[in-house]
Structures are given as structure tokens and as C-alpha cells.
Amino acid sequence: MAASESYPDDLLYHPEHDWARIDGDEAVLGITWYAQDSLGELVHFEPPSVGATVTKDESYGEVESVKAVSDLICPLSGEVLEVNEKVVDAPETVNEDPYGDGWLIRIRMTNAAERDQLLALDGYRTVLDEA
Amino acid sequence: MQPLRRTPLFDQHVALGARMVPFAGWEMPVQYEGVIPEHKTVRRDAGVFDVSHMGEIEVEGPTARDLLQSTLSNDVDRLEPGDAQYTLLTNEDGGIVDDLIVYRLDAHRYLIVANASNTDAVHAWLKERELRGSDVRDVSDQYALLAVQGPRALARLDLEPAKAFTWSMAELDGVEVMVNRTGYTGEEGVELMCMADDAPELWSAVLARGVVPCGLGARDTLRLEVCYPLHGNDIGPQWDAISSGLGWACALDTEFTGAERLRAVKAAGPEQKLVPFAMTEKAIPRQGMPVEGGGEVTSGTMSPMLEVGIGMAYVPAGAAAPGTELVVDVRGKPRRAEVKKKPLYSKEHR
């Protein structure tokens, strides 16, 4: 079952429809409801390797639907601590629960100041209105 | 850029919540509920596709047969009125200008169904070669075409089974239709042609019978699972029909444009071949990806039924045998695949 549209107010957003949930010097990353809805049912998640370095505004992996491939744009720079293997095995988890079980990777942030460049919910809603 | 064209069912698609996309100059539904559920419905029950964007060209007159026999690859003399045939419009090099279905309507009248993006080219090609006593007309705007496909398609429409590649006239819930025993999904089913004005009524009647609306997304994954080539992806003017694996649709004992070249390719053996393959590693092949050792993916997707990446690719003839390992360059990452026999999916997988 696809999730219904929602955007939690405790997340930070990147205009490329990615979200980050920050906890201390770690962050969990995923894609927004809008991103998964635009793609349709996900059938493949190409994750980065654990230990890899990811860079803000650059691709850290890919998700694919039957029809399309989409780069995952990293909202924050850091080192990959964990990949959500549940999504590797069952990519549709992202459609079902984009902010919960459908998280994609967990990182250790290397530039805490970058969080100030991300959007709060209000800012992201403006992006969505223009999409 | 020309504005996108709309089929007579545009309003119906929008009302159903379809995601509309540009396709071959038309604004078409790519999906309603989702590609995967629609795909599975066609494999297990019945789905309907609006394919009214496809072109219809009528060729009529005492020399209609001569015109078609000299331009199309298959043997049009095998057709009686009531028959249909898969055939190719080939260029001098044996390359494929379009793949077509020809219906013989009566002794001197044929209907050609062409791909949307090639209809103008096919019409122009035949018009230029029109013979005294043959008349070529683009009648695309007059008709709508609905493909009803799936193991329960006939039952849901109360139609009796009939031989593939035949057609007959019928009335379906008050709408006069040409019932064509053809399709592009590998399932049983029909393609219903009606007057454009009748399309909304026919569409409603088909849906009322429990047939599920399906978009072009599912149409593409369905055809790829059964290895039907898509013109513009897997076949085209740059590849000869033999290399494209369509020698079976070429009557090389007849004379048509490109026949000589195709006989030569067949005699020498093609240097490359279009083959179906399935990934043996987790990855989805896509059109344009290189194949190691020479070759290129022409279509690729995740198979909703097989749940692996599948595709078609041109590979050197030496690498074309089923069981051969291929390595596909998936955006810089080498991923293994295996050449398969056609079709990739068959009913045993259901």
C-alpha cells in the first residue's frame, strides 16, 4: 500500500526532494513522499557502500522504478554508517513508509554547518508549490 | 514544437486519474493505478489500453496487392479477407521503417496499422509508390483502437476464441467494432477498432465488464517480457530485419524493397543479433547501456513477473546463443546478465 501524502515537520529538506533526520552528529536520509510518488513503485535501490564518503548536493546512490532511474541527492556531507538493507531487499518499502521503514542511509556528518542550508517544512512546501 | 495530440478518450483518462505523458507526439496515459499492478492484471485477468494514437492507413484498388507486395516484407498473398499479418516496411538496406499489421478487408482493400510516430512516414512511403489503380489514404483520425488483453479478456467481452491474426465485425454493447485477434502483451486478447466518435461508449462498456484500464507503462513491460520489439528502441532503419530477429516476417522468396540485401545478410549470417537477456546480478538494464565486448541495450526494465532486470540488446553473433554471459555497463558498474531464449516470460511463470 502506498502511503498517503505527508511531510513531517521534524525533518530538514533538500529541494531535490530528499529529507534528513538529524540526531547529534548523525543523520538518517531518505526521499520525500513527493519523490516516491513521482517515481512510482520502486523496484531497485543502488546504495553507497558503508564507509563511503557522501557529499552535499551530489549523488549518493540511485533509486529506480520500472520506468525511471533517479539519482539520490545528498542533503548533508558525511560518512556512510549504515545502509537500509530492508530497502535493498524490498525497495517498495519506500513507497509504503518514506519517512519510517523506508529510510535509505545513516551517515556521520562531517560538516555540521550544512544543516543551516537545508529547508524546514515551510521552505520545502514552497518548493513543492512550484514543482 | 507542435502541440501534443489527444485521443478521443483523453477526458476519460484524466477523469480516471491517469498520469498523462508525451509519447510520440501524443498526450497519453502512462499509468492509472501503477505500472506493476496494471501489468499483473493483464497477466492474470484483463486490462484495456487506449492505443488510438496508432495510425491507420487504407490501401484500396485493383493494384493494392501489388503495391503492398512490393513494399512490405511479408507475403501479402497469404492473406484472405478476414486475415491479418505482421509485416515490415523495409528500406533499401533491409532496415525497418516501421513494423505493421496488415488486415485484408476485402479482395482489393487493406488496412495497415502503424506505430504513432511512424504513421506519416509510412503513409508518405506508400503514397510515393502508389500505383495506377491503388489509393493510399491516412484514415487515422477516423478510428479509435482499444487493446483488451489478458487471460480473461475474451470471457469478459463475451467473445468466442478465434485464430490469432484474424478479424471479424461484431457489436459490443451496442457499438460496432472490428475485432482483431492481435495484441502486444503475449496474452490472449483482442484489439477493438471503432469509429472515433464511438470510443467513449466502447471504453465505458469495456470498463463496465470489469476490464481494468492500463497505461503505456504496463504495455511496455508486458511486451518486453515476451520479447516483442519496439520500433525506435529495438528495431529501426539502422538495423536490418535479419539482425533484428524478424526474418520470420520476411518472405525472401518475394520481391520487396531491401529483399536482396536481406537475402545477402541471411546467406552470410548477421554480424550482430538482437537477443533477450536477464540480469543475473541485481541491476536494471536501460536503453543505451553498453554491453561489454560490443553491443548495446535497446530496451530494459525490471520484469514485474520475473522480478529481475530484463532487456534486449544487439550483441555480436558469437555472443548471441542462449546461456551466453553478458556484462552490461550499468552507469559505470559492470553487471552480469545471461542471454535467454524468447520469450523471457511465459505462462509457466504465472
Image (spheres, helix red, strand yellow):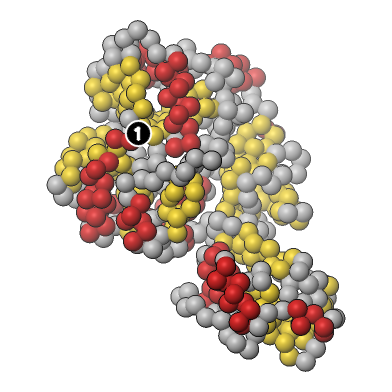
Would residue A63 be seen by someone viewing this image from the given angle?
A: yes
The x and y percentages for residue A126 are 59, 75
Residue at image x 28%, y 21%?
B109
Dot 1 corresponds to which residue? B140
Q: Which amino acid does label 1 sit on?
A: Ser
Q: Which of B232 and B307 lies nearest the eye of the viewer?
A: B232
**View extreme (top): residue:** B132
The x and y percentages for residue B74 are 43, 22
The image shows residue B113, relative to residue B133, as above or below, that is below
Q: In which quarter of the image is the C terminus of chain A?
A: bottom right
Residue at image x 41%, y 18%?
B127
Residue at image x 60%, y 36%?
B274
**View extreme (bottom): residue:** A24
Chain at numbered mark 1: B
Query: Toward which corner of the image does residue B323 lie, by quadrant?
Result: top right
- Relative to A66, is B128 on the left or the right? left
